[in-house]
Image (cartoon, rainbow, N blue to C red):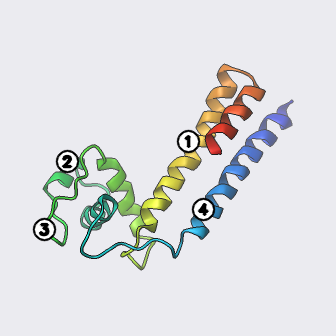
Amino acid sequence: MFFEYYFIDTLIFLFSFIIFLKIFFDTFDACHLAPKAMSDNGRMIGAAKKIRFFEWPSKIHSIKTDNGEVPRAELREYWVIFLSLILKLYKNKLTDHPSINLSLVSNLISSILIFQILRNYFNLECAILGFLLYVS
């Protein structure tokens, strides 16, 4: 019983991580930002380039992008702050892939948490079903 508990946790993590890696590598060269017609993701990446991790979250509202526009990061302050961390890993900052990468990390953590919560409140079969429904 003890090993079964950790074995299933390991399988859930590995399955989630394989999905993460598949989408990560499939979208690596597919996402590029348009230089003039900035989308919301492009504006958030522009704001993430100008903010540091330990700055106050409300500083985002006073940042202007390269075009002089406000990045429209209302209610997404923490997303932009964590996006600034992920941008440090990228050499090419003119891509939308860091935003996709952050959403993949968020999805990976959420799928594992959904499994854990469902297993604690219900049984293992419900947890696996809920996990598979969320991941699919």
Q: Earlier in the sequence, mark 2 or mark 3?
A: 2
> Which residue is located at x 33 percent, y 55 percent?
81
**Which quadrant is home to the N terminus?**
top right
* Marker disc for residue 58: 2
Marks 2, 1: nearer the viewer: 1
**Up-down relation of residue 53 to residue 77 (above or below):** below
Mark 2 and mark 1: span between their CA atoms? 26 Å
Mark 1 and mark 4: span between their CA atoms? 16 Å
Which residue is the site of mark 4?
Answer: 23
Instruction: Count the labels in the image.
Output: 4
Front residue of 63 and 27: 27
Q: Earlier in the sequence, mark 2 or mark 1?
A: 2
Q: Residues within 10 Å of mark 3 (few under 14, many from 20)?
A: few
Marks 2, 4: nearer the viewer: 4
**Up-down relation of residue 81 to residue 42 (above or below):** above
Marks 1, 4: nearer the viewer: 4
> Which residue is located at x 79 percent, y 34 percent?
5
* Marker disc for residue 68: 3
**Which amino acid lies under the numbered mark 3 shown in the image of this protein?**
Gly
> Which residue is located at x 75 percent, y 46 percent?
10
**Up-down relation of residue 46 to residue 59 (above or below):** below
Q: Is 86 on the left-hand or right-hand side of 35?
A: right
